[in-house]
Amino acid sequence: MTKLPSVLITGASSGIGATYADRFARRGHDLVLVARDGARMEALAARLRQDTGVAIDILPADLTQREDLARVEARLREDETIGILINNAGAALSGAFDEQSLDDIERLVALNTTAVVRLANVAASRFAKAGSGAIINIASVVGLVPEFGQTVYGATKAFVTFLSQGMTHELAPKGVYVQAVLPAATATEIWQRAGADTSTLHTMMRVDELVDAALVGFDRRETITIPPLPDAAQWDSYQAARQAMLPGFANARAAERYRAAS
Ligand code: NAP
């Protein structure tokens, strides 16, 4: 029997990433777990090794630090057993845009975009040469909703969705599958870590329901998976509206409304 590809999961110490680790271990995949909290990942790995018998490596790394990120990139580049990357590590940032600190914004952008695109690029290069592989990028519905007022977080997640769509366009013909998962509010530690109100956690989607739904989308090879959205046709209409503008983008003349009256 051919061996299943190993799965490298970032942000695997808690929440969505830890749940993906559980599900892929139960599917029989070996794992490489990445996050800062090595002890927490060891505890998860010990439980999963015992329950499932898969091999699990722990790679502690702070993905906002270039040297740590480089170690994860090297592992992805050199370990040919890894055939699935889950770009999940991420954080949120509370407060109004004009009151957020530049350092906090820079750290968020480093984690939610720079690390994601660097790891995606390294994985895509090797997977495209091999003609197979899968990349799951965890975005967010917040990236579609500027009205939520989470401007920087939402912008990083819009980046991840666009990145995934562009990667699909370029990489599907080379045999590489890319999925963007857009969760809405899900009960994890992200809220507490961002200093947000946690009193409504019990009304949010449970993390296991979110990941199990996302895996249904993965198995169907969806490009975009939005677990809480009841009407999938709404997403299709949204894409159709965008694509309907494409001929207009090709005009060499400014639109009539912008031409100076002579
Ligand atoms: P979480 O429980 O806080 O998990 C975040 C994970 O990222 C943890 O494993 C954390 O581990 C890791 N991480 C944080 N900073 C890191 C850093 N500098 N370097 C390496 N790893 C780091 O939150 P979650 O909800 O599962 O978040 C997972 C993804 O889902 C994020 O991308 C988030 O934006 C997205 N998402 C969440 C929701 C939601 O409502 N929960 C909604 C939409 C999208 P360590 O602390 O050990 O490093």
Image: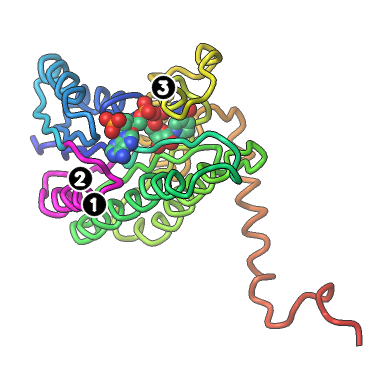
Give the quarter of the image for residue 147.
top right
The 10 Å Cα crowd at callout 1, few under 14, some 14 to 19, many 20 or more, is some
In this orientation, which residue lies closer to the viewer: 142 or 227?
142
Residue at screen point 15% across, 15% down:
47
Q: Is residue 207 above or below residue 233?
A: above
Give the quarter of the image for residue 192.
top left
Part of the protein shown in magenta: 60-85
Question: Is residue 74 on the magenta stretch?
Answer: yes
Query: Label 2: which residue?
Result: 83
- Residue type at mark 2: give it: Gly
Q: Position of residue 84 (x, y in %)?
A: 24, 42
Q: Is residue 93 above or below residue 134?
A: above
In the image, taking residue 215 as reference, residue 149 lies left or right, namely right
Dot label at residue 188? 3
The 10 Å Cα crowd at callout 3, few under 14, some 14 to 19, many 20 or more, is some
Foreground label between 2 and 1: 2
Query: Label 1: which residue?
Result: 132
